[in-house]
Amino acid sequence: FCYMSGWASQIICLLLHLPRPSLEMAAPKPITRLISHVILDLDGTLLNTDCIVSQVLKPFIVKNGKKWDSKKAHKFVGKTPYEAAAVVLEDYGLPYSTEEFLSLINPMFSEQWGNIKALPGANRLIKHLKSSRVPAALASNSSRSNIESKISCQQGWKEYFSAIVGADEVESGKPSPDIFLEAAKRMNADPSNCLVIEDSVPGVTAGKAAGMHVIAVPSVPKRTDEFSSADEIINSLLDLRPEKWGLPPFNDWIEGTLPIDPWFIGGPVIKGFGRGSKVLGIPTANLAAENFSDILSDHTSGVYFGWAGLSKRGIYKMVMSIGWNPYFDNTEKTIEPWLLHGFDEDFYGEELRLVIVGYIRPEANFPSLESLIERIHEDGRIAENALDLPEYAKYKESPYLRNPLQEGAATGGNEAEQEFI
Ligand SMILES: [Mg+2]
């Protein structure tokens, strides 16, 4: 349970006094000089490339008579294509040379570049740096031509970067500092004035070796301990606070909330974990997250809010936690919406539609059950107040919340029994 980081697992761990994984995010060390330039990694930092890697590799490996293991996927993160290929060949015992394998697999990847989505907060960050006139470079272990192909699918990215450096343009890829030093050189920047944002351990190592400040945004959950050399660790780009680094702050937070592009999710309310959150005053109406793994892979864990439509009752304010599920080795997420309304009865099996409109905070560790409960209630108050703002209130009228579920379109969750956490 304790490696499940949604509200339910946090509550259970605190109830049972079980050890919890460290979710502490390292506070930035004091800055000695102001940051003037930003250097961004691409795959896993700005782009959700991991999704594509699994989509391409899984059928290839299965076709070669081997069983795909999603637990191994994290081993490719931050590697050059050649290194990643060698890892795949060794792990799965495939009968190819690295060169043969790359020549087979590269065209399959190229076909997918256009399908890679920007990670949450990536477009926001690029627009912010652009409007703040902060020069930025892209520094990736990918080849220059692959970088260009990938970013040409993202509107406005290519024009923005002052420099783009691929692994094939320097002597050694990350964890060597070469790529970052070359990026700084092309921007005429002193390495000590550069802030690197990276999702992988080799990338963080490379940034520090280059004498730069490094923020880690780990793309593999629950491995923050491997990133201790980073100057700061954040959960996602949504949590980036540029002012900590002497850069202009984002101005889009409203009353403790960050507006996001709305996303929609729905299904029957299902049985949860049976641990009496009702008693704690936080009755969540869970959805079967496994039915939404594609949508959830586009969103980072944390606390969000929005509107909830119950097919037989009406529309309510809602705050929710997205966490990682240990039953699936942290490759699947949990989704726990708390409808901010006192219901007289349970409603398991009833169709629940959600529109998620804003973000409140990343996951955090709490010293006691009381402090966790207090924080969840504060999340509820923040959501309650924010949803009255026109920015968020308008989504209450979203047709998706009101449309009755099409007969036969129900996904999973046949349990008609009501359950709270
Ligand atoms: Mg990366």
Image (spheres, rainbow, N blue to C red):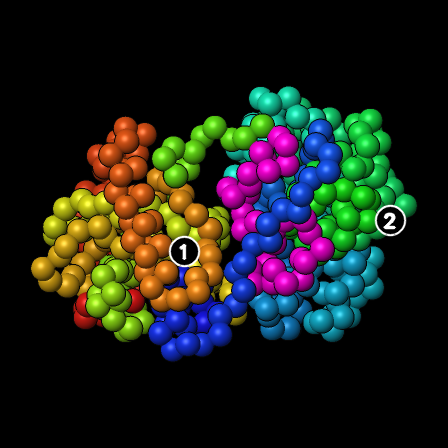
- Across and down, in percent, residue 65 comes to 64, 73
Q: Quadrant of residue 334?
A: bottom left
Residue 79 located left or right of residue 305: right
Q: How many marks?
A: 2
Asked if 94 appears above or below 339 in the picture, the reply is below
Hey, which quadrant is residue 275 in on the image?
bottom left
Judged from this view, the residue extending furthest toward the left is 344
Mark 1 vs mark 2: in front: 1
Front one among 161 and 343: 343
Q: Which structural element holds mark 2?
A: loop
Above or below for 43 versus 138: below
Who is closer to the viewer here, 78 or 244? 244
**What stretch of residues is rendered in magenta?**
218-247
| Image coords of residue 115 (percent x, y) | 56, 43
Whether 237 is among the magenta residues is yes
Query: Looking at the picture, does residue 346 appear above or below residue 298?
Result: below
Q: Nearer the viewer, residue 151 or 174?
A: 174
Task: Give the residue displayed 70% in from the left and 26% down from the top.
Answer: 135
Mark 1 lies on residue: 322
**Quadrant (top left, top right, bottom left, bottom right) of the N terminus:** bottom left
Residue that mark 2 sits on: 172
Dot 2 alpha-carbon crowd within 10 angstroms: few under 14, some 14 to 19, many 20 or more: some
Amino acid type indicated by mark 1: Ile
Quarter of the image where the C terminus is located: bottom left
Instruction: Tell whether 180 sits left or right of 311.
Output: right
**Residue 169 image offset from top left, x and y in percent:** 85, 39
Residue 227 visible in the shown view: yes
Rendered residue at 64%/36% (across/down): 245
